[in-house]
Amino acid sequence: MNERTWDGVYHRHGKRPSKSSVPSHASQSHVPDPNNERDEAAIRYWIKFADFYQMPYITYYDSVRDLADKLSKTTLLQLRQISARMKEYNANVLKEVMPKWKQILINIAKSSVNAPH
């Protein structure tokens, strides 16, 4: 799962990072380091926040047999309905998130030494 973090992807020499390059704030010392690729507890803590665990309409399976069983019981119509719901959800998220990021970036730009006067 080395694609989970930037450091995991960046370090291609086989060494998995055991900590972030920037230390956490003291108030967050109880939270596992998100860039610790050597600690199973840290990985388990952070992986639960991955997009695919937050998004609705995803069908999860526990094994290849479970997947095959679920697929055999799902109709093409049901798959199309799931896909349509996912598409609608993603469109709504985009409408909600884009203005927020735009405002964040505008605020950052205002504080930049390169901000227009």
Image (tube, rainbow, N blue to C red):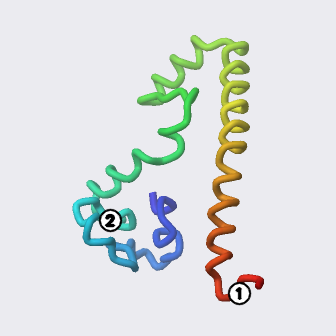
Amino acid type assigned to the residue bearing label 1 in the image: Asn
| Quadrant in which the C terminus appears | bottom right
| Disc nearer the start of the sequence (1/2) | 2
Q: Residue at x 32, y 51 (%)?
A: 45
Q: Is residue 66 left or right of residue 46?
A: right
In the rendered image, the vertical position of residue 110 relative to residue 113, given as above or below: above
Badge 1 element: loop
Q: Is residue 28 left or right of residue 117?
A: left
Quarter location, residue 22: bottom left
Distance (Cα) linking label 1 and label 2: 33 Å
In the rendered image, the vertical position of residue 61 relative to residue 54, given as above or below: above
Instruction: Tell me residue 23's x, y (percent).
Output: 33, 76
> Mark 2 packing: few (<14 Cα in 10 Å), some, or many (20+)?
many
Badge 2 element: loop
Between residue 10 and residue 42, name the one nearer to us: 42
Q: Residue furthest bottom?
A: 113
Q: Residue furthest left?
A: 30
Q: Residue at x 47, y 72 (%)?
A: 7
Amino acid type assigned to the residue bearing label 2 in the image: Asp
Instruction: Tell me residue 29's x, y (percent).
Output: 24, 66
Instruction: Tell me residue 47's x, y (percent).
Output: 41, 50
Quarter location, residue 90: top right
| Location of mark 2 (residue) | 33
In the rendered image, the vertical position of residue 92 relative to residue 78, given as above or below: below
How many marks the image carries: the answer is 2
Q: Residue furthest front?
A: 117
Between residue 78 and residue 109, name the one nearer to us: 109
Give the number of the disc on residue 114: 1
> Mark 1 packing: few (<14 Cα in 10 Å), some, or many (20+)?
few
